[in-house]
């Protein structure tokens, strides 16, 4: 069995011939994994050697590995630190879709799981959500694509459901695939979905993002209202509340997807139906 050797940031900086603050920034941005021992950061000797072995290039570590560091910055309410990690990922060649699929969305899911198991508090979750909201606002415009639009998608979370981030993520991902997306955000009354779908030309689908628990009746009513007013327009559902195809059928939806990747496939499919 090998035992890992941990060293201080000061020693790591000497070994890498870098300023202490540069190494500290590597820790904050997840480039160098670290643990706190007696209030002081320690890094693994092997990680420092790995970083040093790259020489001048110092290639960033694989992008998924930056997710825990991003999560910690979000929970700390540190928008600037979280943004640095996103910039690092973009700078190392990730496109913005990958940043959503590999970093931001998994981070939000993990934060929810940690809140459920009481590993983090409601305050932590709120701070993370506030940071995520601001990051989405900054990344959103990067999804803009040139070329002909592929039809309109209306999206939102139903009445009683405050989870506006989920539709916002999906809206950007679909914009990146050249859909024109009208995002109504959280807590959207059924009448607003209907009004917008009725007065908009070229609607290819209405997407209901359902996350809040105990809200299936509202989702069912919303799907029915859209079907009544706009026959022929598919109503799709997804989000944490829609845990299976059976639940999607139960609320009367035309189709569903279990996650963001599945949602993108579903929308591509809608175009050829
Ligand atoms: C942030 C957050 C909040 C924020 C929301 C703020 C905001 N502006 O969005 C706040 C703090 C307000 C909040 C409140 C609550 N929350 Co909350 N929240 C979350 C958290 C951590 C992240 C949500 C998120 O953004 N997820 C990321 C998205 C991207 O993932 P996703 O939802 O799975 O969506 C992806 C796919 O499913 C798919 N998809 C989504 N929509 C659609 C639609 C279609 C058509 C398709 C095809 C696909 C698709 O694509 C998405 C990617 O874009 C989740 C944890 C989690 N696992 O998600 C809990 C979570 C959703 N919340 C939960 C709960 C319980 C609540 C509260 C009820 C807590 C409370 N007791 O007060 C309240 C809601 C109060 C109410 N009125 O009902 C539970 C829900 C459990 C359930 N459904 O059974 C979760 C899962 C936490 C947990 N692990 O227990 N929450």
Image (cartoon, helix red, strand yellow):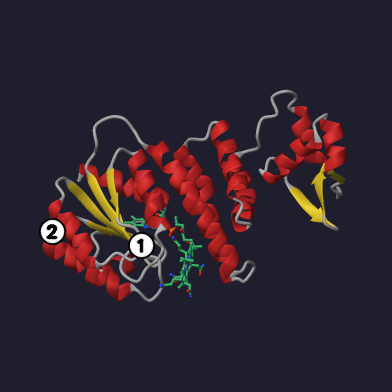
In the picture shown, does residue 161 fall above or below 78? below
Q: Position of residue 82 (x, y in %)?
A: 59, 47
The residue beneath circle 2 is: 230
* Residue sitting nearer the eye, 265 or 113: 113
* Residue sitting nearer the eye, 123 or 249: 123
The answer to whether mark 1 is within 8 Å of ligand 1 is yes
In the picture shown, does residue 117 fall above or below 226? below
The residue beneath circle 1 is: 186
Residue visible at 72% across and 44% down in the picture:
27
Disc ID at residue 103:
none
Kindly state the secondary structure of the residue where label 1 is placed: loop
Query: Can residue 250 be seen?
Result: no
Q: Quadrant of residue 45?
A: top right
Q: Position of residue 178 (x, y in %)?
A: 30, 38
In the picture shown, does residue 64 fall above or below 57? below
Query: Is label 2 in contact with label 1 (beta carbons under 8 Å)?
Result: no
Residue visible at 41% across and 48% down in the picture:
261
In the picture shown, does residue 234 fall above or below 220? above
Q: CA distance from mark 2 to mark 1?
A: 22 Å
Q: Quadrant of residue 144?
A: top left
Q: Residue 138 vs residue 247: left or right?
A: right
Pointer 2 or 1: first along the chain: 1
Q: Quadrant of ligand 1?
A: bottom left
Q: Position of residue 208 (x, y in %)?
A: 30, 60
Q: Residue 117 vs residue 140: left or right?
A: right
């Amino acid at each position: 069995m090998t035992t890992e050797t941990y060293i201080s940031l000061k020693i790591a900086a000497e070994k890498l011939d870098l300023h202490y603050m540069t190494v500290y920034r590597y820790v904050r941005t997840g480039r160098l994994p670290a643990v706190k021992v007696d209030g002081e950061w320690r890094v693994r000797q092997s990680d420092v050697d790995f970083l040093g072995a790259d020489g001048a290039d110092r290639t960033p570590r694989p992008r998924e590995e930056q997710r825990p560091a991003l999560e910690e910055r979000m929970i700390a309410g540190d928008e600037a630190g979280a943004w640095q990690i996103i910039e690092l990922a973009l700078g190392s060649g990730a496109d913005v879709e990958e940043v959503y699929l590999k970093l931001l969305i998994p981070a939000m899911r993990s934060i929810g799981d940690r809140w459920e198991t009481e590993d983090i508090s409601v305050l932590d979750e709120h701070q993370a959500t506030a940071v995520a909201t601001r990051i989405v606002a900054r990344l959103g415009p990067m999804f803009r694509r040139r070329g002909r639009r592929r039809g309109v998608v209306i999206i939102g979370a139903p009445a009683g459901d405050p989870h506006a981030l989920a539709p916002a993520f999906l809206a950007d991902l679909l914009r990146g695939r050249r859909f024109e997306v009208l995002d109504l955000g959280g807590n959207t009354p059924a009448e607003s979905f209907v009004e917008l779908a009725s007065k908009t030309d070229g609607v290819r689908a209405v997407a209901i993002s359902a996350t809040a628990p105990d809200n299936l009746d509202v989702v069912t009513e919303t799907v029915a209202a859209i079907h009544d007013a706009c026959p022929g327009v598919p109503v799709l559902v997804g989000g944490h509340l829609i845990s299976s195809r059976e639940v999607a059928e139960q609320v009367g939806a035309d189709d569903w997807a279990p996650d963001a990747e599945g949602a993108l496939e579903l929308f591509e499919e809608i175009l050829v139906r």
